[in-house]
Amino acid sequence: MFVYYLELAARSFRRDRALTALMIVAIAFGVGASMTMLTVLHVVSADPIPGHSRDLYYILVDSQRLDSYVPGEEPDFQSTRFDAEAIVRARRADRQAMMSGGNVAIESGRPDLPPFFVSARYTSADFFPMFRAPFAAGAPWTAAEDDGSARVAVITRALAGKLFGPGDAVGRAIRVDGHDLRILGVLDAWQPNPHFWDVSSGRTYGETEQVFVPFSTSRELKLRPEGNMNCWGNEPGPNDNLALDAPCTWIQLWVELDSPDKVAAFHDFLISYSEEQRRAGRFQRPPNVRMRDVLEWLDFRQVVPRDVRLQTWVALGFLLVCLINTVGLLLTKFLRGSPLLGVRRALGASKRSIFAQLLVESGAIGFAGGILGLGVAWLGLFAVRHQPTPYAQLAHLDLPMLGATFGLAIAASLLAGLLPAWRGSQISVASQLKSH
Amino acid sequence: MRFLVDTGPILFSLRRHRTAATLIVLQIALTCAIVCNAIFLIRERLVRMDRPSGLVEDELLRVRLAGIGTTEGAQALTKRDLDALAAIPGVKSVVSVNMVPFGTSSWNSGVSTIPDDPKSPMNVATYLSGQDLVGTFGLNLIAGRNFQPEEILSFEDTAEPAVAIVSKATAERLFPNQDPLGKALYFGSKHPTRIIGVVELLARPNDWGGRDAVGCSVILPVRMAFGPASYILRVDTDRREEILAQVDAVLEQNSASRILDSKFTYTALRRDYFQQDRSMAWLMFVVSAALLVITALGVVGLASFWVQQRRRQIGIRRALGATRGDIVRYFQTENFILATIGIVLGMALAYGLNLVLMDKYEVERLPAQLLPIGALLLWSLGQVAVLGPALRAAAIPPAIATRTV
């Protein structure tokens, strides 16, 4: 029956070529535009570390002055170096790491490769196991290297290839801002997006940092940090904003806790830490702590660009208009073919089979629209990738999105076909036969 | 009103095609709502992209470089760089400054009119430069004077600047209806910084602080070394590329152990900064155009069907003496009525959509003068779309009335 309906549909398409083409194009553009924007939205709002995002918590304690305190207000969105170091040292979580972004000069010493800048991350040993960073060779540094401000580094495979070619980079030296560091490990391809661990910089999407150095080492070597810094109550005169006791927030602090009990216990620890600091005179405000897992933190910081959401809504609105357009045109088309439907009814076809036949016809239009819509989505994503926005490079049509495009096209056309098909199946047999 | 004589029969006939008429009205309404908001968003982005900085942008170049590791004598090297850059033919002046409008970094500070204020009432962008920033940026000094050499500090000094030049926006916010000259500013300490000059406009580096804070900035006479600071060159407009090409070699001569991070004309800097807005405006434009085309084609499709369905009636009207013009006018009036209903609905919808956008995406209120533009657009679109089918209807010969009976 289905095949017979398809044949009827094909015949019907041949009768109204222009109208059919118009419907296919409308569905293709509606679906193509929607899938383009949904793909971009999917890319920018995806879970960057699936399976672990609920176990990793971004930690904040409030260390600012009492005279600017507003009860209930959020603490500043980063930590002071003092608090971060103290909380990491306490080792109350399964894993804990403090970190800051940086920008360092790399000198290869090779005449064919002039010095260049790469982005760096100054962090502590747990960073790698905590964020499931895969190693291609070697291993991360340990707490011992953190404590000893060891001259060590972990680099990405891309940077290792650029500096040393295909050879083994582990054990070799890399010259970072004029200091030789021994390479302990090389990271395999790893691109969690967004870079949830530090969303304060403009580089939230795209490539990860290429050089990782122990935080303690970065301070001893005075490597430049990069990112947002907020200071308050500075004494007049020159201030070292990077000093241990500087009243400045610029550190991101993460912990891993794999059970609700541990989360509750850690929350208690943060409260007691704050109270202790207050007794010691460092904190002035009542304890004000925050723990957010990866997804909560990304949501709170509104990491997904607002424009992307807006564009997605616009594309879906566009699809809606295309659908209404298709409903109208299908109705036109089916009613125009009503004399033929009248004949089929008179020859014994039930209302249900007419309805089914017309729905198959709608679905066939959706199928064709889906194929064309894939082309539109592909072109759309091609255009998106040529935008200079950092997340643009990530927008590719993957298999699930491909299936979704098809599904959306067929579902949309079936939905659009419901009303026209029903109207088509309700025509009165007698009047259609009479006029001819 | 000869145009509307057919209204009665048209409404009667539309009642018989309620579903199709409803669909086309709905489509026009949605298109109207989306296109109105899209035009508004485009306009908003264009205004944003056009935001003035206060600088003579077409005469400026920006060069950034950074040392490898800690550079000893960075201030002295900066001085030599500035002298060398100023000596390039076509360069009018050079400064070293911590940030620029539409750059990537921004330095901000709380500022108050009273000493030791824990809650600074406003936040300003703090431009630091030890050279003639006002002259090189081409800022318009509307009151007071520029800095004098003895007022200039070095970034490494322990003292705080005694004087500042503020933007008009900053002056008006801190000292409404007063002469700001000679008034004291406090950057969270006891130390007063006196206002000696006011510039008409100096934009913040970025959108930090939102729409109200755009023009709130101060200039402090603090000498900045390369690295955190970048060099701004004011040059002859038509020699920009030529000078930009010479910069590397000139700086390399002063010291080889540095990396040139980036060099741009200011025009390029502005273009990069507003790239996202440009993409958005284009996307809205393309979507609007596609919507209008789809809706026009929908109108054509439906009108063609109606013409075909009414061939006999049209023939009869023609046989009874209706002119071709009458037939065309009938379809045009019909379309006008449908479009009008769609537009009225669309306006309400556009307004509702705008309310949602205002709530979620910090869009401003849809200005009323945009609505007639949307209406005019859809009316003309409908008329153009219906013209083809209407002309075909008018071409139906009166003889058709006799044929199939």
Image (tube, coloured by chain):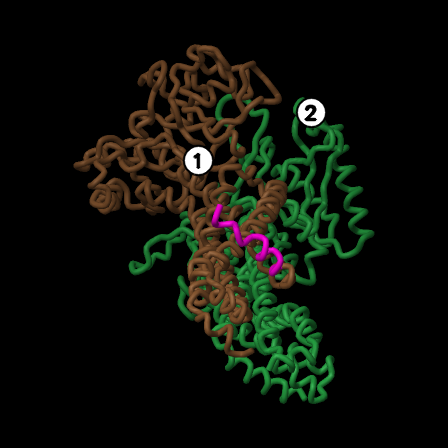
Which residue is depicted at the point 62% across and 54% down?
Answer: A127
Q: In front: A14, or A67?
A: A14
Q: Which chain is brown?
A: B
* Amino acid type indicated by mark 1: Pro
In this view, B256 is above or below B167: below
In this view, B355 is above or below A26: above
| Magenta part, dominant SS | helix
**Looking at the rendered structure, which numbered label has been put on residue A130?**
none
Q: Which chain is green?
A: A
Percent position of residue B350, x then y: 58, 46
State the separation of the CA atoms marked 1 and 2.
Answer: 30 Å
- Where is residue A252, by image quadrant? top right
Residue B58 horizontal side relative to residue B117, left or right: left
| Magenta-colored span | B1-14
Q: In front: B366, or A44?
A: B366
- Judge the density around disc 2: few (<14), some (14-19), many (≥20) Cα neighbours within 10 Å: few
- Residue A400 lies in the magenta stretch: no
Which residue is depicted at the point 54% across and 59% down?
Answer: A37
Q: Which residue is mark 2?
A: A66
* Amino acid type indicated by mark 2: Leu
